Amino acid sequence: MDDKTIERLRDLRVRREQRARESVLRQRIFTRAAAAEAEAAGQAVTACLDGAANEADAALSDTVGRPVPWRQLQAIQADYARANRTADGLRQAEAEASARAADAVAALGGARAAYCERRRSVARLERLIADRTRRSARRRAALDELAAAEDN
């Protein structure tokens, strides 16, 4: 391979490395967003459960020490069941958000591995270019020496 071809190949690999680096950065941003989404979903579940427990405690504390109509008990039970259904939906959303966060972490690992491979390929080509430059410098020095010897 001539020097021009090697240089073009190096430039191509450098561009690939830059794209891989940009992919890692995008994936890192996506991973952070997915983790924040999972955290927010967990907090929503906790808030829903706390709110449901507080509402149930308040409703039951109002009924202590006095006769309670059946319809009121049914309403309290229905409110609690509704809160549980809401919490179940939020738990499902939290599980999906956690799964997306785990997928994002795995994708980030893949992007990092691709970047490292691209970086290694650029480094190998740079070493090859440096070796060829060093060898050609020796050859040029030898040729210059021969040319100087022939001129004398």
Image (tube, rainbow, N blue to C red):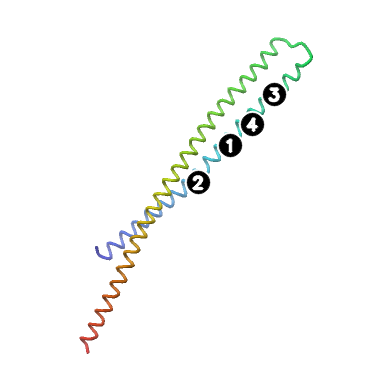
CB under 8 Å between discs 1 and 3? no
How many residues crowd around disc 3 within 10 Å: few (fewer than 14), some, or many (20 or more)? some
Q: Which residue is pictured at 39% across the width and 54% down the height?
A: 17
| Secondary structure type for disc 2 | helix
> Given the image, on which type of amino acid does mark 3 rest?
Glu
Q: Quadrant of the C terminus?
A: bottom left
| Secondary structure type for disc 3 | helix
Rounded to the nearest angstrom, the CA distance separating label 3 from label 4 is 12 Å
Which mark is drawn over residue 29?
2
How many residues crowd around disc 1 within 10 Å: few (fewer than 14), some, or many (20 or more)? some
> Given the image, on which type of amino acid does mark 4 rest?
Ala
| Secondary structure type for disc 1 | helix
Q: Is residue 111 left or right of residue 51?
A: left
Rounded to the nearest angstrom, the CA distance separating label 2 from label 1 is 16 Å
User: Dot 1 corresponds to which residue?
Assistant: 40
User: Dot 4 corresponds to which residue?
Assistant: 47
Mark 3 or mark 4: whose residue is earlier in sequence: 4
**Position of residue 87 measured from the top left corner of the image (x, y, whole percent):** 59, 26
User: Dot 3 corresponds to which residue?
Assistant: 55
